[in-house]
Amino acid sequence: MSGLERASIDAELTPGFRILRPHERTAPFVLCSPHSGSHYTRYFLDQSCLDPLTLRKSEDYCVDELFACAARLGAPLLAARFPRAYLDANREPYELDPDLFDDVLPEYANTQSVRVIGGLGTIARIVADGEEIYRRPLRLEDALERIERLYVPFHEALANLLEDTRRQFGYAVLIDCHSMPSSLATQTGSPRPQFVLGDRFGHACDLRLTRFLRDAIAAKGYDVQLNRPYAGGYITEHYGRPVRGIHAIQLEINRSLYMNETAITQNHGFARLQADLTTIIERTFAEVPAMLEHRAAAE
């Protein structure tokens, strides 16, 4: 394995995630922020042809801070420290782009997913607006170093949190927290909504949970859409198994609500959005468990 890649991870990205834990687990929820990491290693910056501010266009800036209320309200929040432009935890472990590497990729690599073809695999080739990240092709061993030392432990931590929650409460609810650019329109040409909830079209969680969150967000005056343009990524699809007692839903926030997307800074709406999300999460933690437990008892 690459000594430089390993050394940079050890020195600057260890641990690769943080967990905000409640003093007492009182809610059957786990929140996850896989794209809010903002620790860019010097080695990665040297590999890139983009400046640090441009690389940050792929971040879900401050999403972990927006949802930090979860720990105070009784549930853990898992947040990546590594940036999405470096490694994307909301992908399969080996969605690898052949155009990004000098090496022949192993047979187990998924080289034909829509995300890989779009340049946004596990190791992204481009940032969110389409600019190429790297000066030259990568070595496969460097990519595997990132996956084994950062991606795998992140998902082990997430799986353990969900299983611990399921054991304690009989079920678990994962809220996967993201943000989306405001400038792009939907496929119909209309402006993007303020929130998008993705439940893989009803496959990843109880439909009543999706509707509850939609109504709770709408009650605060926000425009909410379901599954379009985002139905939920790998995390929602992989962990959402209602028949096994694990529900997962992806929550996307329009960045114009809380940040300056050019300067990558908070705007005047940040405090209001954070307060509204706290109210929404508090209400969700208080009311959803009875809903899900009632259904489990009926079955």
Image: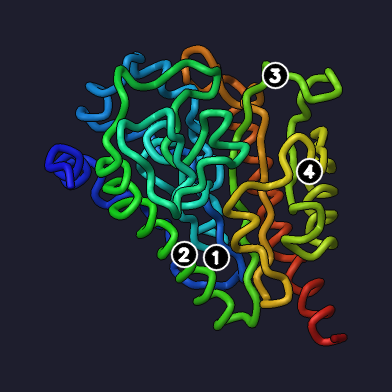
Number of other residues with Cα within 10 Å of mark 3, as a class: few under 14, some 14 to 19, many 20 or more: few
> In the rendered image, which residue does mark 2 sit on?
22
Q: What residue type is labelled 4?
A: Asn
The image's mark for residue 74 is 1
* Disc 2 from disc 4: Cα separation: 30 Å
Q: Which amino acid does label 1 sit on?
A: Gly
| Dot 4: element | loop
Q: Is residue 123 left or right of residue 242?
A: left
* Disc 2 from disc 3: Cα separation: 37 Å
- The quadrant of the picture occupied by the C terminus is bottom right
Q: Earlier in the sequence, mark 1 or mark 4?
A: 1
Residue located at (84% from left, 20% from top): 190
> In the rendered image, which residue does mark 4 sit on?
227
* Disc 2 from disc 1: Cα separation: 5 Å
Number of other residues with Cα within 10 Å of mark 1, as a class: few under 14, some 14 to 19, many 20 or more: many
Q: Which of marks 2 and 1 is nearer the N terminus?
A: 2
